[in-house]
Image (spheres, helix red, strand yellow):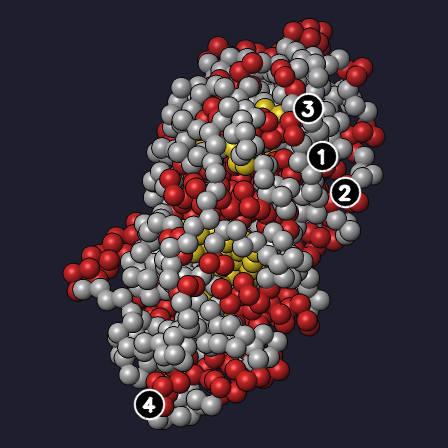
Amino acid sequence: MSANSSVSSPQTWPADDQITDESDLVAFTTKLTLNDSIHNANQTDNLRTGLVYYEEMSEHRCLWDDKHQENPKRFTETLKRFKELDLIDRCLLVNPRKATEDEVLMIHTTDYLSEVKSTQNDEDLELLEEKASRFDAIYFHPKTYELALYSAGSTIDLLTDIATGKVRNGFALVRPPGHHAMSSEACGYCFFNNVAIGAQHCLNNLGLDRILIVDWDVHHGQATQYSFYDDKRVLYFSVHRYESGAFWPELIESNFNHIGGNNAKGFNINVPLNETGMTNADYLSIWHNILLPIAYEFDPQMVIVSAGYDAAFGCPEGEMLLSPVIYSHLCHSLMSLANGKICIALEGGYCIPSLAESAAITLRTLIGDPCPLIEELPPIKDSMVSSVLDVISALRPYWKCLKMQGSFDRQSGDPTNNNRQHLPIVEYKGKMALMDKPVRYPTRGCCPVQDADTKQQILNEINRQKAITDLSPKFTQHRTCIVYDDQMERHKSWSTHPERPSRTKFIFEKLKSNKLFDKCLRLESRSATDDEISLVHTREYIDFIKSTEKLSEKELWDLFKRLNFTYIITETYKAAKLAVGNVLQVVDSVLSDQCLNGFACVRPPGHHSSQSEASGFCVFNNVAIAANYAISKYGRKRVLILDWDIHHGNGTQKIFDGNDKVLFISLHRYDYGKCFPKSPKADYNIGKHVVNIPWNDGPMSDSEYLLAFFNVILPVAYNFNPDVVFISAGFDSAINDPLGEYKLSPQMFGHMTHMMSRLANGKLIVCLEGGYNIVSNGLAASQCLSVLLGNAPESLTNVVNYNESAIKTLKQVIAFQSTNWTNLRFDWDLPEN
């Protein structure tokens, strides 16, 4: 099967040297050999998540207002929840320490440091309150200075341990918080800016020069913005309640049009929320349309999260509706960056039950547990669509990835494609920026108060969400299962046929050599029964394949020509039954919670075979049978099949046509219908439960596939909310594949696996399809399995340019599917200037 013809003769199939050529792989993907990089990943297997906290942080409290919301329970109840979920014992504890004055002075001024220090051990409450009144939303305690030093120093040391490889990632359970603390001014319960100090330490002392700071606190971290506003080494991203400036801290510079200083245009990103009640769907849309595309293009060496949980349900400050589980998804998506080097540092959050639950689920995610299922997503709010488009409009001159919106001339008003037009408007409705700074700020009665009934309703809802959230272990000893049987290699034709036994044999040897295979539970091989195969295929077709065991060599040759050069030999029936049976073994292991996920290294492949026809080297449709098996045996109601083989999985699509329990998504080379299987059914305009992304005018690379995931696949998948995910994993879009001719790096397959593992509570089954450069196959499969085992995917180094034809295709897909999936709401034109 060639890319540009429906039938390829044996004389035009790639020779052995094309099948095994490794000439460009190392240079294309990384300076290290992939064996070395997988070795590095294996070294991180034994690394644990770092956790730092200091028990005495609970002593920091407001002595003149016992109802103050920034109170010790924020720390003690969160720590209690960590213990209830047995998370602390699974972490490596980092010793807390005080920051030195020199470390604090990396961000703050000497005079300000002295002013905070002057409160140390001061028992005069009247004087402490007087000093606090000079700052906005501040109280001092006799131990504030000491504990603020502990907060900053502990964050520094955790970041150091992450950067130097002592821990995999980390959570700093610290208070007082920091992201409002400016160079010479305490603000918003913050004294020393923990995250800014930690980031500056990474720049000054750890050799890092690309740091991503993500601030998901509901308040704008203005002080962190100020610290790095003109420094392009730090990409600062904040999503915050703004309400056109009417929400605290009421700053003009918190709006979307403040994008960085003259030396760092585009490196400051504000996503202002101009309405309360934002939901999981709204925040996911920010991640998919803005943060993740830019973050991948930026390619950070460290990710630091200012993790305020005051956008979580029930918080009186935020008045948003995020469920605790969404923080798992937000965190997990960031763990694909910087080779997994991510530090979470606690900021705000003032509804204690939702704070404790949200923080615990975040830590659980860092440790490696799967993202819990989220409830059905509501529609994205209109104001969120406007905010996202505003941000994209301001930033797209600086980031190549922001190309999904069209343009119009705001002078003439003429659109380029007759699309809807969005005109960003900069608006300020606040007061603080227009007033002189107060001589004295209020120090009492400043926090919002919820009555007893409201608190009980919130607690009831949090308890309901906890009750439906499965936080139980999804596996016992082995996270990942794998199946491979060399008996499938008995299905073989002449040596030049690209679908040859070495495809699976090399993958197996590669996974053994880099020690990934041995970390998995190896399942026993078995053959599928005819009844199991009949979940998809007709009895007549099964009998026909079975009958080939008795055909002569000449009859088999004639059959080969008749079946579009899909060969069948006397051993094919047994091998194909083994392929199906082994995939079902993985399904049983995953869906019975023996393992979290699994990898099926099987052949012959399956995704081109329909109910009654072999095609494209495929005999029985392994993934389609497995999907129906999951539905019939395990009662799964929403099955997602992602097919990233470079050839369209026409058989799978045909099998599930009209079945609303199965969502089929396919990325494939189409070339206007010239690429196998040469069917108009492979185009984008098919139906709701078929989402085809048909590439034209390639070759495509990592960049285009990332755009497809962020703008189509993940939004649609979250709308569908599957309870199990299958991947038809063809590796023929990898670099140097002689049939695919695309340029995906092996690492990209790890990233795609990581993105899909957020869904279905981690229930993910990867099944081999195509791929005809056996070295590329081995490298790509290693990346997938490494991620399944819980390692972070390796950083991509080639997210630079974007094929205009790919963008056109994605726009067509979005335009067609937007009426089917409510997450696809961002197909608007923006002004050119």
- The residue located at (52%, 51%) in the rendering is 257
Q: Is residue 677 visible?
A: yes
The residue at 36%/33% (across/down) is 637
Q: CA distance from mark 1 to mark 4?
A: 66 Å
Label 1 sits on residue: 743
Badge 4 is on which residue?
A: 125
Q: Quadrant of residue 134?
A: bottom left
- For the residue labelled by badge 4, is the local secondary structure a helix, a strand or a loop? helix
Q: Earlier in the sequence, mark 1 or mark 4?
A: 4
Do the residues bearing badges 2 and 1 touch, measured as CB atoms within 8 Å?
yes
Mark nearer the viewer, 3 or 4: 4
Kindly identify the amino acid type of the residue bearing the numbered disc 1: Lys
- Secondary element at image label 1: loop
Q: Secondary structure at mark 3?
A: loop
Question: Circle 2 — which element?
Answer: helix
The crowding category of the residue bearing disc 1, from other C-alpha atoms within 10 Å (few below 14, some 14 to 19, many at least 20), is many
> Which image quadrant for residue 556?
top right
Residue 149 in the image: state x and y as whole percent. 51, 81
Please name the amino acid that badge 3 sits on: Asp
Name the residue that disc number 2 marks: 28
Give the numbered dot on residue 697.
3
Q: Nearer the viewer, residue 53 or 704?
A: 704
Which comes before the other along the chain, label 1 or label 3?
3
Amino acid type assigned to the residue bearing label 2 in the image = Phe
| Residue beneath the point at 54% across and 68% down | 195
**Left or right of 238: which side holds 11?**
right
How would you rate the neighbour count of disc 2 (Cα within 10 Å): few for under 14, some for 14-19, many for 20 or more? some
**Label 2, label 4: how far apart the Cα atoms are:** 64 Å
